[in-house]
Image (spheres, grey):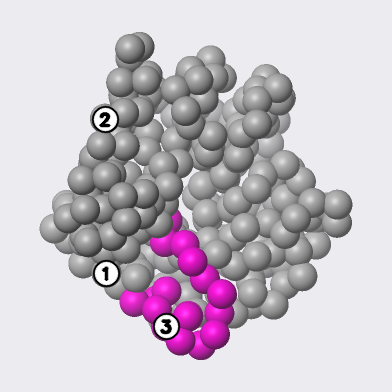
Amino acid sequence: MGAMAAAVQACRERMTTACAEAGRPAECARLLAVGKTFPAGAIREAHAAGLTAFGESYLQEALEKLDALADLPLEWHFIGPLQSNKTRPVAERFAWVHGVEREKIARRLSEQRPSALPPLNVCVQVNVSGEAGKHGVAPDHALDLARLVARLPNLRLRGFMTIPEADSEVARARFSRLRGLLEQARAEGLAVDTLSMGMSADLEAAILEGSTMVRIGSALFGARPHPIEEQGISA
């Protein structure tokens, strides 16, 4: 077994164990492989090991990978904050966006989504920790933004996403709060089914609190290189 296949298996085993501890079905959460800063070849290896959903955060790097890997049946997710000058390529080429935190971005994504494509799947990003340096809408305003996304014609509201503090005990409380938002949205009649929460270090805590999608980078690809500088598209 190669290194990537072993890493994928180890992640899946962690997820299965966490699902069992939470009293949830064995495949209660999807594994979203986050390949930002890693080359297209690493994504190709991960696909060969059985993964199909991949997340990226740097747009220019992501678009180069989409082109290089166009021969593979991959599902692409854009993760994190998105500025208005970058919405068109995301609307045109991605299946999911995990970082919608403003009405303007939501409206632009809907307007720029090609009519020939299915609606763009959207998770509203929520800053559950309230940290000034973190992206995301405040929890008190998250449902307002979710209602707006649900009304836009070319978007499909799927749920909520968050990136909490690194401390796993604190993170679990944050994950619980995001789950509460999902439950409120469902009580209102919004058709939400996704909690995008949990990463390599805290996927167990996230699954215990109801995560349906964990975003895994370092546990699959190893230590991440320094963030790349985007060229040609202002950051």
Q: Is residue 10 magenta?
A: no
Q: In this picture, is 190 found above or below 233?
A: below
Q: In this picture, is 232 found above or below 140?
A: above
* Residue found at the far front of this picture: 25
Q: Residues within 10 Å of mark 2 (few under 14, many from 20)?
A: some
Q: Residues within 10 Å of mark 3 (few under 14, many from 20)?
A: few
Tell me if 110 is positioned left or right of 3 in this view.
right
Q: Three-letter amino acid code at disc 2?
A: Ala
Of the two numbered discs 1 and 2 in the rendering, the one whose residue sits closer to the viewer? 2
The span shown in magenta is 180-196
Q: In this picture, is 36 found above or below 191?
A: above
Secondary element under disc 3, as helix, strand or loop, is: helix
Q: Look at mark 2 in the image and give the residue it sits on.
A: 10
Q: Three-letter amino acid code at disc 1?
A: Ser
* Residue found at the far bottom of this picture: 188
Q: Earlier in the sequence, mark 1 or mark 2?
A: 2
Q: Quadrant of the C terminus?
A: top right
| Disc assigned to residue 176 | 1
Secondary element under disc 1, as helix, strand or loop, is: helix
Q: Quadrant of the N terminus?
A: top left
Please give the name of the residue rendered at 21% of the width and 53% of the height, measured from the top-left corner: 20
Q: Earlier in the sequence, mark 1 or mark 3?
A: 1
Residue 81 image point, x, y percent: 53, 52
Q: Look at mark 3 in the image and give the residue it sits on.
A: 184
Q: Three-letter amino acid code at disc 3?
A: Gln
